[in-house]
Image (tube, rainbow, N blue to C red):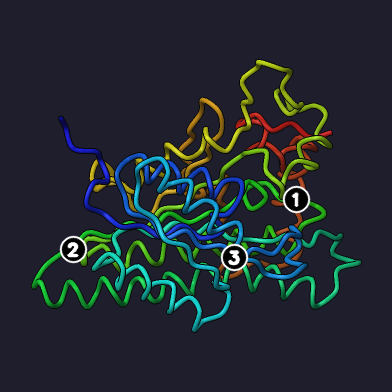
Amino acid sequence: MAALPLEGLSAIVTGAGRGLGRAEALELARLGASVVVNDFGQPGRDGSGEASAGPAEEVAAEIRTAGGTAVAHTGDVADHQQACELVGLAVSTYGKLDVLVNNAGILRDRMIFSMTESEWDAVIHVHLKGHFNTTHFAAAHWRERSKAAGGPVYGRIVNTSSEAFLAGSAGQPNYAAAKGGIVGLTTSTALALAKYGVTANAICPRARTRMTEDVFAAISANPGSEEPGEGQLDALAPEHVAPLVGYLASPAAARVNGQLMVVHGGMVAIVERPKVAAKFDAAKESFSYGELDELLTPYYADRPANETFAATEVLGLKRD
């Protein structure tokens, strides 16, 4: 029998008690990985409510029932010390850490003119700092292993960004900013850890979860956003995203590093880094206001009014 792609590897999946994280944890286990299922277990998608071991324990038990290997961790990845303990649990339980999937997050949506400082800080804290915390301790682990081995080791990081970063999201300035920061964190990490044998990539998943179900319901022009009928395949099911995470965690993806991919049912789009759309040179050593007015005002006057959303439209997410 051929070995499973992730056989002998260990993985952490954060925010794995529900939705995308759960689907990703189940997929990694199905592919042979031993998994640490992390979830703080708060019931509210805004991070409210009492923390509970239930969601993480249930997914870990589901993996074990299916014949896999899993343990639960119920700490808060936004807490630096608890993130350290999470990585430590993977190393003490499985002997090493090979794969880190950062997925944990919350939403506190509000328009920029109404958003409070605490709403901004909470989302940045969980998403961006949470990604940093686990990445920091995983990276230190791989660096030490590489030094001891005298060469590259195996390491994979899969981070979770969002199309809210790619094209904006009017009522989510905190979320869009955090997801943009995660892309920057990912590309920096990819460059820093490549020599140790570690890759870091980010995905922008489109899936119907507790965090997004009302978002898709509101985007009436988006094909496939409606709930599927009985017996129909849900194009926005988290299970459509999980195989890409499994691939990026595998040896087959050794040459995939510092990439951003949009993924949903039946589609993976590789996003290029920003390109220069137009270039203007000053007639002398520097620009004057008048010269910029003569060059830039006509340029933007000729652009379509909805050009800002072009990237989203290419990827199939229409807006009203």
Relative placement, left or right, of 263 versus 247 is right
The correct choice, above or below, for 42 with respect to 253 in the image is below
The correct choice, above or below, for 224 with respect to 92 in the image is above
Residue sitting nearer the eye, 159 or 318: 159
Pick out the residue farthest to the bottom: 81
Picture quadrant where residue 12 is located: bottom left
Instruction: Name the residue at 56% across, 53% down.
Output: 161
Q: Nearer the viewer, mark 3 or mark 1?
A: 3
Q: Residues within 10 Å of mark 3 (few under 14, many from 20)?
A: some
Instruction: Name the residue at 58% across, 74% down.
Output: 78
The correct choice, above or below, for 308 with respect to 199 in the image is above
Instruction: Name the residue at 84% across, 33% down.
Output: 320
Report the residue marked by disc 2: 153
Picture quadrant where residue 49 is located: bottom right
Report the residue marked by disc 3: 53
Pick out the residue farthest to the front: 65
Q: CA distance from mark 1 to mark 2?
A: 39 Å
- Looking at the picture, which amino acid does disc 2 mark? Val
- Looking at the picture, which amino acid does disc 3 mark? Ala
Of the image marks 1 and 2, the number of the one nearer the N terminus: 2
- Looking at the picture, which amino acid does disc 1 mark? Ser
Pick out the residue farthest to the left: 150
Q: Nearer the viewer, mark 3 or mark 2?
A: 3
Relative placement, left or right, of 277 versus 138 is right
- Residue 84's x, y, as percent? 43, 79
> Callout 3: helix, strand or loop?
loop
Report the residue marked by disc 1: 169
> Callout 1: helix, strand or loop?
loop
Pick out the residue farthest to the right: 114
- Residue 22's x, y, as percent? 53, 48
Residue sitting nearer the eye, 206 or 69: 69
